Image (cartoon, rainbow, N blue to C red):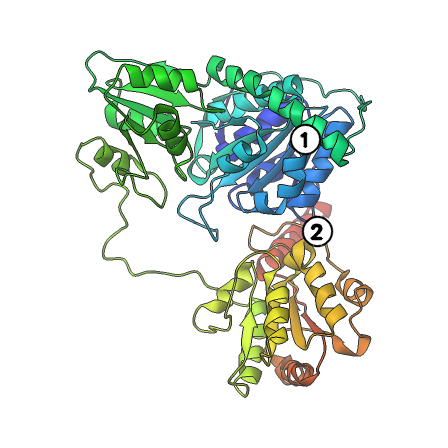
Amino acid sequence: MKRLLLGDEAIALGAIHAGLSGVYAYPGTPSTEITEFIQGDPLAQKRGVHSRWCTNEKTAMEAALGMSYAGKRALVCMKHVGMNVCADAFVNAAITGVHGGLIVLAADDPSMHSSQNEQDSRFYAKFALVPTFEPSNQQEAYDMVASAFELSERLREPVVLRVVTRLAHSRAAVEVGEPLAEKPLNVSTERWVLLPGIARKRYDALIAKQPEMEQAAEDSIYNKVEQCAEAPRLGIVACGIAYNYVKEVVGEKANLLKVSQYPLPAAAVQALAASNDAILVVEDGQPVVEEQVKGLLGAGYPVKGRLTGDLPRTGELTPDAVAKALGQPAGSAFAPAKHLAARPPQLCQGCGHRDVYTALNQVLADYPTHRVFGDIGCYTLGALPPYQSLSSCVDMGASITMAKGAADAGLFPAVAVIGDSTFTHSGMTGLLDAVNDHSPITVIISDNLTTGMTGGQDSAGTNKFEAICLGLGVEPEHLHVVVPLPKNMAEITRIIREEIEYKGVSVIIPRRECIQTAARHAREARKAKEEKK
């Protein structure tokens, strides 16, 4: 049977059909749709597949590892920057090994469509010494999930599945098979206790598995060589989605090695090099494979790619860029549109964040030395006109700790703006540091009762923020909840002004439901009412 699926949806369905028992994730574009698909899939619901959103990627990785310990297949999903958050658990999972199959899905975002950087998750997999799958199309995305679970259980190691935005968010017809049953509960008899004496032995065992991982890549059906006698003597190594771009440009007239499973199949690369005068490495992301091929073939063999300037060093790969690298007319099909004015994103009309920034700007106009430290979320748009309120936005949770550090340096006033989901993701520990130091900062937790930026998923701390702040030691008289509406502006500005002058930690929680989820809930309520008639 064929189904029209996004790359994300193909991965999700592939996981369900491979006997998935739990998906653990924090929403982040371009990975969000995987968990959402599993949450809404009838078979997953019937089986009771765990699919509740986690507080952050670290808790997701650890929970997935726990499910693996119990012998069941688990999937943990995140965007590329989430790999930074779960890195401790992820790297150590390679040392403990796994029991039930465990896939770590990393959705990378070349060109930074909705991200702070272009980091390439293949580096993480290489760093942790675990295998990676990188599908070139939606069909492979579906098929690879089962292959990755099987390899994970055979090697007893986590396996990374890496996709990019273009594959995650494009659709294609996918041939789907019959679903497998879930694995039975089968708790590991081993103790995953990484005391140094045990960890050294486990690390030795991981190193000993490397030849088997390398051979698995050499033998993989997802890595293949294509030769053409009429092709120029330029070998092409095409990784993941880049394979499609190469085929679009050269068709069958290429000496080509498609790479979609790692470690890099060294023997295949060497064979390609032996029958060609140079190699072009085409990959969407950073020059992960290009660096490895250079090291493998030595300085005397010409290897081209992003490092040499034959392909752009930054940004998303396109067929136009590949054509130019191959000496063909580049075209302009994927060039930025001309004669169109830039249209930066804006906060929704009626959004509560707008009233927060209006009040904040009004008060801070009296403090010329002020700085407002921002965070990751739709409220980050407060850095743009018309508000231009934020001085920084670095990573999840950085607002509070940067405000604290600036206050430690003598800056006054130092204000942090953080969203509700981001606060529970990674802001709570920073607030505890500030409380313990009695730092003179004002923290604004702009609570729209959802994870708004990624589509309105549940927020882990909803209706718990006052208790969390009090539990962390915020003084009750310096914890305020306000409703961000124009009619309440006088009250909100008064509270902000008073708390800025307080020489300790104060927290203000402006709370009003996201305008988008409010509209959705209203539609659902009307529909439910009509169905009762």
Mark 1 lies on residue:
95
Q: Which residue appears at 53% of the width and 59% of the height?
A: 394
Report whether 296 appears left or right of 413. left
Which picture quadrant has residue 495? Answer: bottom right
Quarter of the image where one finds residue 172: top left
Tell me the SS state at disc 2: helix
* Residue 417 lies in quadrant: bottom right
From this view, report whether residue 281 is shown above or below residue 435. above
Q: Position of residue 374 (x, y in %)?
A: 55, 66
Instruction: Specify whether residue 48 is in view.
Output: no
- Horizontally, is 529 left or right of 366 in the view? right
CA neighbours of label 2 inside 10 A, class few (<14), some (14 to 19), many (20+):
few
Where is residue 175 shown, x and y percent of the image? 50, 19
Using the image as rendered, state which of residue 448 and residue 91 is in the foreground.
91
Q: Earlier in the sequence, mark 1 or mark 2?
A: 1
Q: Is residue 454 above or below residue 231?
A: below
